[in-house]
Image (tube, rainbow, N blue to C red):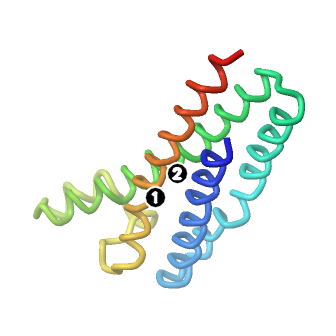
Amino acid sequence: MKKSFIATVSVYLLTAFHHYYGSKVYGTPWRAHVVVGGVPALLLCFLFMVLYQRFGMRVFLAVYLLACFVLFSLFIGLFEGFYNHLLKNILFFSGMKEQTWRMLFPLPAYEKPNDLVFETTGVLQFFVALVQVYYLRLLWKTAWRRK
């Protein structure tokens, strides 16, 4: 369980840095909402981890796994990391015409890939979330089936 939570915290820390950095580089303070907004989600995961460890009830494990997966693997890893950055970079650097590319990634939410730190941390969110999914799945296989 500890490894799955460390992986979840890693997804949060990476996305918090990424969004804060992006808010400064691009002058878009609305990006920084993830820094504060992610804290309650992380605390929710932590709460259910502690409840499961304390009481051993499957419902707490189920909520922990679901919250970590939906909030961090899907929203951050799949949507933010894969779609917003990995796919955007693949299409942009493949030479796709800007008018076509912009249909999928319109302004002002999406920037052209012109900052190495922003794009690298954006893409890394997907891969760190894959590690998190691995540990969540491992926890599910061992803890859920054990009882």
Question: Would you call the spot at circle 2 few (<14 residues within 10 Å), some (14-19), or many (20 or more)?
Answer: many
Q: Nearer the viewer, residue 56 or 78?
A: 56
Q: Residue at x 67, y 67 (%)?
A: 35
Q: Secondary structure at mark 2?
A: helix
Residue 37 at x, y percent in the picture: 71, 58
Q: Nearer the viewer, residue 116 or 133?
A: 133
Q: Quadrant of residue 4?
A: top right
Q: Amino acid at mark 1?
A: Gln
Residue 64 at x, y percent in the picture: 71, 35
Above or below: residue 87 compared with residue 17: above
Quarter containing the N terminus = top right
Q: CA distance from mark 1 to mark 2?
A: 7 Å
- Work out whether mark 1 precedes mark 2 in sequence or the reverse, and give the earlier one: 2
Q: In the visual, does 91 lie left or right of 129?
A: left
Q: Nearer the viewer, residue 89 or 48?
A: 48
Q: Amino acid at mark 2?
A: Ile
Question: Would you call the spot at circle 1 few (<14 residues within 10 Å), some (14-19), or many (20 or more)?
Answer: many
Q: Residue at x 56, y 24 (%)?
A: 141
Residue 137 at x, y percent in the picture: 52, 32
Above or below: residue 9 compared with residue 30: above
Q: Which mark is residue 76?
A: 2
Residue 18 at x, y percent in the picture: 52, 71
User: Which of labels 1 and 2 is toward the front?
Assistant: 1
Above or below: residue 43 compared with residue 57: below
Q: Residue at x 36, y 60 (%)?
A: 85
Cβ atoms at labels 1 and 2 below 8 Å apart: yes
Q: Nearer the viewer, residue 141 or 118?
A: 141
Q: In the visual, does 45 lie left or right of 8?
A: right
Residue pointed to by mark 1:
125
Q: Residue at x 79, y 28 (%)?
A: 60
